[in-house]
Image: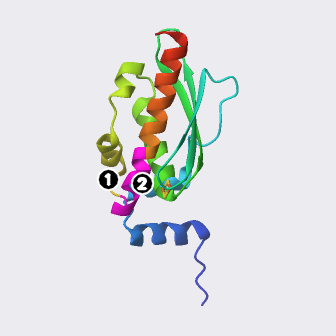
Amino acid sequence: MVTIITTSDAERKMLADAGYADPAINYYLEKKYMGYIENADQVSENVGSCGDTMKVYLKIDDNHLIKDVRYEITGCAGAISAAMAAVDLVKGKTIDEALKINDGDVFKVLENIPEKKHHCIQLAVKTMHKGLQEYRAEKVV
Ligand code: FES
């Protein structure tokens, strides 16, 4: 009998073996906030210490609530899962609330990623904060 392992099953196993917990793996495989927002209110870019790049697209309503966020990422599984988790943490929040979200909050949502990937969480959070700060500076809110 031949057992077929799908790409996604194989990837899931590789990530689990590397130290990614289930929530982190799901965020990485689903990539639900990857892409861009046409007519975004703010687009900001950031480069991590590893040289990888993230671009964040923000949609913010008249009450300064974060309606939607998308990321474009040239980075690793850690970066992608962290960015997707960061979006779930800030959606529907005010700019002030979103600026308080830190690496530890994202790590809690992911439950675990390899230690060597913790700087990737930092890149996701820093990029989000940069976008919010640049939006605020331009719109004077
Ligand atoms: Fe560059 Fe993770 S974002 S190694």
Circle 2 SS class: helix
Return the x and y of residue 129 as percentages of the image width and height.
44, 31
Q: Residue at x 41, y 68 (%)?
A: 16
The dominant secondary structure in magenta is helix
Dot 1 amino acid type: Glu
Return the x and y of residue 133 as percentages of the image width and height.
46, 23
On the question of residue 63 being in view, the answer is yes
Badge 1 is on which residue?
A: 111
Badge 2 is on which residue?
A: 24
Extent of the magenta region: 113-122
Return the x and y of residue 116 as percentages of the image width and height.
37, 62
Q: Which mark is residue 26?
A: none
Callout 2–callout 1 Cβ contact below 8 Å: yes
In the rendered image, residue 85 lying in the magenta stretch gets the answer: no
On the question of residue 114 being in view, the answer is no
Q: How many marks?
A: 2
Circle 1 SS class: loop
Q: Residue at x 47, y 13 (%)?
A: 64
Q: Residue at x 60, y 90 (%)?
A: 1
State how far apart marks 2 and 1 are (Cα).
7 Å
Q: Residue at x 65, y 30 (%)?
A: 37
Which badge, 2 or 1, is on the more N-terminal residue? 2
* In the depicted structure, whether residue 121 falls above or below residue 99: below
Q: Choose top left, top right, bottom left or bottom right for residue 24.
A: bottom left
Say few, some or many: other residues with alpha carbon within 10 Å of mark 2 (under 14 / 14 to 19 / 20 or more): many
Dot 2 amino acid type: Ala
In the rendered image, residue 116 lying in the magenta stretch gets the answer: yes
